[in-house]
Image: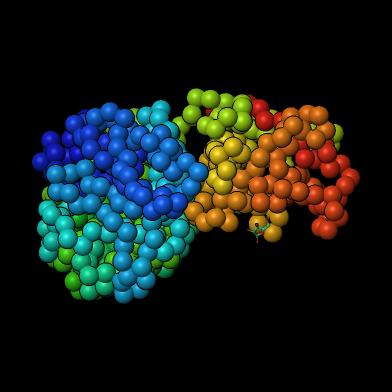
């Protein structure tokens, strides 16, 4: 059974089921989301490969070939048709935009699919829903998100919100929140935390944040975030690794006591994704799937849903390795005599050159593993997605190469696109910058740049240039 089959059988049916990656009912065979392309503004819906299966990402790739697409609608798979469209202006943020449709390529069920990657000022909403809890009714919700693409701005949310995009007071929201914004200082560790946005506060417990030492945050590349609320005198928060294991309950107890209005709750029944209730839209985040239920789900149903999510194998190995074909996982070795045991890896968000060997830590191996993608600006070239930071790509900025989340902009796409040519020293491959075609991917003093031989910057030195710009793409270090 899939998540909404599980919740339905447990007597708490889904009233919202949103995903860009897969069906959330075994019998569902309708559309998942709608994309719009930049070239002619045409739209199409992306559906499933089979009933109860995975997104037909190839249909998106072909519709968006040679141009770019954004996601304009995320359909509700539940019979309630609570579809999410791009969010309009609110009390704290102007009109939002849709997420780039190709920014978060992942594997699910062995298929290449796309998650939704939110930069600031991106969000979706439905202010006229059916069946969603209002005025103290019980509900539950979960979403699959990522612990590597977060910030401390308000508010990466999924769940129940106001119907007018304004902050209408305590208890008028009941939404999952995920990020590093600590509303009630201090919080435990650096996050990101799964929290409850109940309006005018991101709650980790009835008292707020610091008092809840159980909420240590969760940094997994794929995170299960879960909230349930009986609307009267109880809410609970759970988190988990969406790739393995079970859920952890970080809070289960009374409604907040930090102000009036939370017991009972006053939910309004709109659904928000990617912003706060008043469209506070400074936050970033990732979304793969999420549901909301009518009624308070049982813990047994939550556990069965987590088991189903784990079985999907989000983000697992693509099955192809060692080549520069899109979808292949690789590690990239330097060929300069100094450095033939050194690999291109990210560290503290920058691209650097580091020794990696079979004895290296799992983190070093993951940081040195890249998934080859079709070039974000030119499909005949390539881009490099981080293996352990889904949706983050290598891009240059001020000619220095770094790991950053894809924001959908033309500048990002160009900066993250590299065109492979024969290695300049006769070994492997050199990677020409798409938007600075005189410059190539180069290591210099163990940092990584796009460089030429002009001498303009220190890294544009002619010394060792052909060796420093020649790389061998081979088997990935990460398992
Ligand atoms: O509760 C946190 C945020 O506060 C809400 O999402 C928003 O509506 C308000 O600004
Ligand atoms: O890296 C060179 C340029 O620096 C990039 O194209 C741009 O994003 C930044 O201004």
Q: Position of residue 322 (x, y in %)?
A: 61, 26
Q: Left of 291 or right of it: where is 388? A: right
Count of all numbered marks drawn on residues in the image: 0
Asked if residue 126 lies left or right of residue 343, the reply is left
Q: Residue at x 64, y 33 (%)?
A: 331
- Quadrant for ligand 2 reads bottom right
Q: Residue furthest front?
A: 40
- Whether residue 197 is situated above or below residue 142 in the rendered picture: below
How far from the left and from the top, in percent, is residue 55? Answer: 34, 35
As displayed, is residue 12 above or below residue 314? below
The quarter of the picture where the N terminus appears is top left
Quarter of the rendering occupied by the C terminus: top right
Q: Residue at x 41, y 34 (%)?
A: 58
Residues 348 and 239: in front is 348
Residue 7: percent from left, percent from top: 17, 40
Q: Tell me, yes or no, if residue 185 can be seen here.
A: yes
Residue at 83% from the left image edge and 58% from the top image edge: 456
Find residue 304 and report its image quarter: top left
Q: Is residue 47 above or below residue 413?
A: above
Judging depth in this view, the residue of 100 and 472 nearest the camera is 100
> Image check: 301 left or right of 422?
left
User: On screen, 278 above or below 273?
Assistant: below
Quadrant position of residue 323: top right
User: Residue 245 location, x and y as percent?
Assistant: 37, 34
Q: Is residue 404 visible?
A: no
Question: Of all residues shown, which one is farthest toward the right?
Answer: 463
Depth order, front residue of 188/386? 386
Q: How is the image coloured?
A: rainbow
353 lies left or right of 62: right
Q: In the image, what residue occupies the spot 32% across and 44% down?
A: 44
């Amino acid at each position: 059974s899939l998540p909404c089959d599980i919740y339905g059988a447990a007597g708490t049916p889904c009233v919202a089921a949103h995903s860009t990656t897969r069906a959330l009912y075994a019998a569902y065979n309708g559309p998942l989301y709608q994309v719009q392309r930049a070239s002619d503004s045409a739209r199409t819906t992306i559906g499933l490969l089979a009933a109860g299966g995975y997104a037909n990402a190839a249909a998106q790739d072909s519709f968006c070939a040679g141009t770019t697409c954004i996601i304009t609608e995320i359909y509700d798979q539940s019979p309630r048709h609570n579809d999410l469209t791009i969010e309009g202006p609110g009390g704290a943020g102007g009109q939002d935009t849709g997420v780039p449709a190709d920014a978060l390529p992942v594997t699910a069920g062995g298929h290449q699919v796309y998650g939704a990657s939110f930069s600031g000022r991106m969000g979706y909403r439905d202010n006229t829903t059916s069946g969603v809890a209002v005025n103290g009714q019980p509900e539950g919700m979960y979403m699959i998100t990522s612990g590597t693409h977060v910030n401390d701005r308000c508010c990466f949310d999924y769940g129940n919100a106001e119907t007018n995009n304004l902050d209408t007071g305590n208890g008028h929201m009941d939404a999952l929140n995920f990020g590093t914004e600590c509303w009630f200082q201090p919080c435990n560790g650096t996050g990101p935390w799964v929290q409850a946005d109940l309006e005018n506060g991101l709650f980790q417990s009835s008292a707020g944040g610091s008092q809840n030492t159980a909420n240590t945050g969760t940094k997994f590349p794929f995170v299960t975030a879960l909230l349930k609320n009986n609307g009267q005198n109880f809410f609970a928060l759970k988190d988990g690794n969406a790739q393995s294991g079970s859920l952890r309950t970080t809070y289960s107890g009374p409604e907040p006591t930090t102000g009036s209005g939370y017991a009972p709750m006053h939910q309004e029944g709109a659904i928000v994704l990617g912003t706060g209730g008043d469209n506070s839209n400074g936050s970033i985040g990732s979304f793969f799937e999420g549901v909301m239920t009518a009624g308070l789900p049982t813990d047994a149903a939550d556990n069965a849903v987590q088991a189903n999510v784990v079985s999907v194998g989000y983000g697992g190995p693509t099955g192809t390795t060692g080549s520069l074909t899109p979808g292949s996982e690789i590690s990239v070795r330097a060929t300069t005599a100094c450095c033939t045991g050194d690999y291109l890896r990210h560290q503290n968000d920058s691209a650097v050159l580091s020794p990696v060997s079979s004895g290296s830590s799992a983190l070093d191996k993951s940081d040195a593993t890249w998934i080859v993608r079709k070039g974000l600006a030119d499909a005949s070239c390539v881009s490099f997605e981080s293996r352990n930071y889904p949706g983050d790509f290598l891009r240059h900025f001020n000619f220095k190469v770094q790991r950053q989340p894809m924001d959908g902009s033309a500048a990002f796409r160009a900066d993250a696109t590299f065109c492979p040519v024969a290695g300049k020293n006769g070994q492997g491959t050199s990677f020409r910058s798409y938007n600075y075609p005189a410059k190539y991917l180069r290591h210099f003093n163990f940092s990584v740049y796009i460089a030429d031989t002009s001498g303009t910057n220190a890294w544009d030195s002619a010394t060792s240039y052909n060796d420093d710009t020649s790389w061998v793409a081979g088997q990935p270090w990460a398992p």
